[in-house]
Image (cartoon, grey):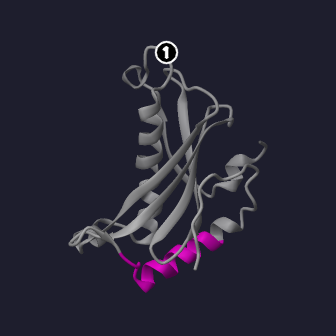
Amino acid sequence: MTNIKNKFPFEGSEKVVTEDMCDMNGHMNVAYYLRSFDIYSRPLFEEIGFNQDYFKAGFSTFALEDSIRYLKEFIQDETIYSRFRIIDSNHKLIHFVGILLNENNELAAISETIVAHVDMNIRKTIDMPENILKSLNQVIGKHDEAGELNFDLRLGLKHK
């Protein structure tokens, strides 16, 4: 998958795999893949407006569904490079994809996630406000400029 990195405009953090992240097979435990996708995608959502002030105002996002594909293993002392792209949204849901690359820029894992916009006072999914939708659509437009993905997605959103 050549130039996969360029298809994911948002660059997340990088992390070195530590001994405590590895399982008895000598590679990174699956829990740390999910953790990497979750933690390293947060700045992307903050850029859209899902920041601490928004949370203090009583709103958040909840993950509804995840799909992770493990393509190459990470072993201790290897560096993980994360990148993200928002694929789609509607008034309540966001579909985004993250990838983890190894030190050779090889695709090691793909994560797809559907998150819901939630009113924390009633703990239910509600429509996102117009300012968040506008910001979200701007980011999606920018991410779409990176071109089509060269792998199939497993998750998707329904549009009315």
Identify the residue at image location x=59%, y=68%. Answer: 88
Is residue 9 found left or right of 136 in the rendered image? right
Q: Position of residue 87 (x, y in %)?
A: 61, 63
Identify the residue at image location x=40%, y=82%. Answer: 129
In this figure, which residue is indicated by the disc labeled 1? 26
**Amino acid type indicated by mark 1:** Gly
Q: Position of residue 69 (x, y in %)?
A: 59, 39
134 magenta-colored: yes
Secondary structure at badge 1 equals: loop
Quadrant where the image shows the C terminus? bottom right
Identify the residue at image location x=47%, y=31%. Answer: 30
12 magenta-colored: no
Is residue 149 found left or right of 31 in the rendered image? right
Secondary structure that dominates the magenta span: helix
Q: Nearer the viewer, residue 118 or 46?
A: 118
- Residue stretch rendered in magenta on the structure: 126-141
Q: Residues within 10 Å of mark 1 (few under 14, many from 20)?
A: few
Q: Position of residue 26 (x, y in %)?
A: 49, 15
Is residue 94 found left or right of 127 in the rendered image? right
Identify the residue at image location x=41%, y=56%. Answer: 63
Quadrant where the image shows the N terminus? top right
